[in-house]
Every structure is written in C-alpha cells, then in structure tokens.
Image: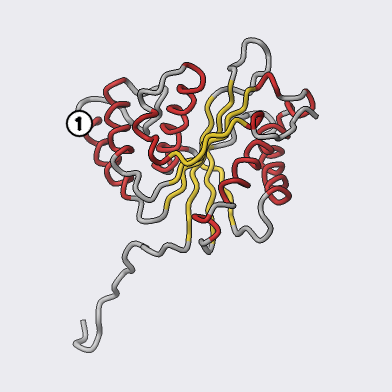
Amino acid sequence: MNSHQHPTVMPGPQTTNDRVYVFLDESGNLDFSPGGTRYFVLTSVSMKRPFHMSSALESYKYDCIERGLEEERFHCAEDNGSVRHQVFDIIGSGLQGVEIHSLIVEKSKTGPALRSDNRFYPEMLGYLLRYVLNGSFHRQARETVVITDTIPLNRQRRAIEKAVKTTLGSMLPSGARYRIFHHDSRSHYGLQIADYCCWAIYRKWARGDDRHYATIANAVLSEFDIFRTGTTLYY
C-alpha cells in the first residue's frame, strides 16, 4: 500500500433515531366457522437500531444448536418449554425503548362482508397501524419501516398484498412516511420477537394465561378490542 493511501473504513452500525422499524405478527386463524379460534390478534413491536436483542438471540440460537436442538428460528408455539422460557427472558430484559401494541378481534362479531380474505386481514392491519403510526414514537421519525411475516394465506397472496398496500394508503395518517415488506420470519429476529409477544397476548385473551405476558407487560402500550372502541365493523 502506498504510504499516502489509507484503508477503507466501513461505516459502523447506525444509531440514528430517525427511523423506526415495526415488526408484525398474528395469532389465531382466519376461520370464521364455529371450529375457528375465538380471537384473531395482531401485534406490532416497534424498535430502533441497533437491535440489541438480535445479538442475544443469535448467541442463544447457537447455544441450542450445541445442545442438539435444531433451532433454525424461534417460534413460540413450536419451541419447547425450556427454549420458550429463555427466549422470553431475553426479550424481557431487552424491552427498553421498545413499544408493543396489539389489536384484538373477537371474530364472531365481524360482519359477513368483512370476513373475505382480501378485506379482513388488510383492514385489521390498517386499524392497528393507523393507531401505531399516530403515536409520538413514529410521528417524530423520518420513516417507519413495517415488516410483516409472510401473508398468512396461501391462496390469493398477491391480491391480498395489493389490498394491504391499497388499504393502508387510505387508512393511515396523512403524510405518514412508511414502507411495508412481507418477509419470512426466519429473516428477522424482530419478527420472531413479535411472534413471541403476540403469542403471549393471545394466550392472555384466549385462555386467561398471563404467565408470559407478565414478562412483556411493561412495554405493552395498548391492547384494544376493536369491538369495544366504538368502531363499527358489521358491514
């Protein structure tokens, strides 16, 4: 290397607070028959970089592998009790600066017209994000990056993704600066954290089990049952 040349220095991790990431997950199914779940729950986890919990979860994933567990990702409903307990401990100790919001839908109260695939999920997502993006955490941000797990319906996926974008454009606050992506949960620890948080909230509502909910409760800023907020969705 020439004495007058200097090695290229790569930029360090971003620590700016002008961009917020929102990771979304859902619990319950979209079956409106008597055999379906009573509730459908959408949960958002908002955070800013650097994502400190990601490094702790990455380290723990390799701990699991070294113990002989095949942990390609953390998924609350599928993980064994020991893994679930440890992941909740990691999440519970890393919630400073994290906001959790959840929308609760008692499905039997949903009008027939709203139950169609290309309306129910996009509109429920719109109601949740309209609330989240109106909060000061997001209004002060230059941009919000919304990342959902892959759309939970195999059929008509492209049509539903288009409906999500169209619905959000009409429902979200005027001037809201956001982008939305649909990624597999394996690609982001943020989505796996959202999965755990949503599972805990769902268990509280569906089964009255708040053992794991207590771990995240301090970061849960809202849980609103959409049919108890004056919203009319019987059309």
Image quadrant of residue 194?
Answer: top left
Q: Quadrant of the N terminus?
A: bottom left
Q: How is the image coloured?
A: secondary structure
Residue at 40 percent of width and 41 percent of height: 219
Question: If the image is split into quadrants, where does the C terminus sit?
Answer: top right
Residue 55 place in picture, x, y as percent: 29, 46
> 134 or 25: which is nearer to us?
134
Neighbours of disc 1 within 10 Å: few (<14), some (14-19), many (20+)? few
- Give the tally of numbered discs: 1
Q: Tell me residue 124's x, y (percent).
A: 65, 36
Residue type of the residue flagged with mark 1:
Glu
- Asked if residue 60 lies left or right of residue 185, the reply is left
Examine the rendered structure and indicate whether residue 72 appears above or below residue 134.
above
Say which residue appears at 49% left-offset and 38% top-offset: 184
Q: Residue at x 57, y 34 (%)?
A: 224
Residue located beneath label 1 in the image: 66
| Residue drawn at (59%, 56%) of the image | 178
Toward the bottom, the furthest residue is 4
Residue 112 screen position, x and y as percent: 78, 23
SS state under label 1: helix
Along the viewing direction, whichever of 61 and 27 lies nearer the viewer: 27
The image position of residue 111, as x and y in percent, is 76, 24
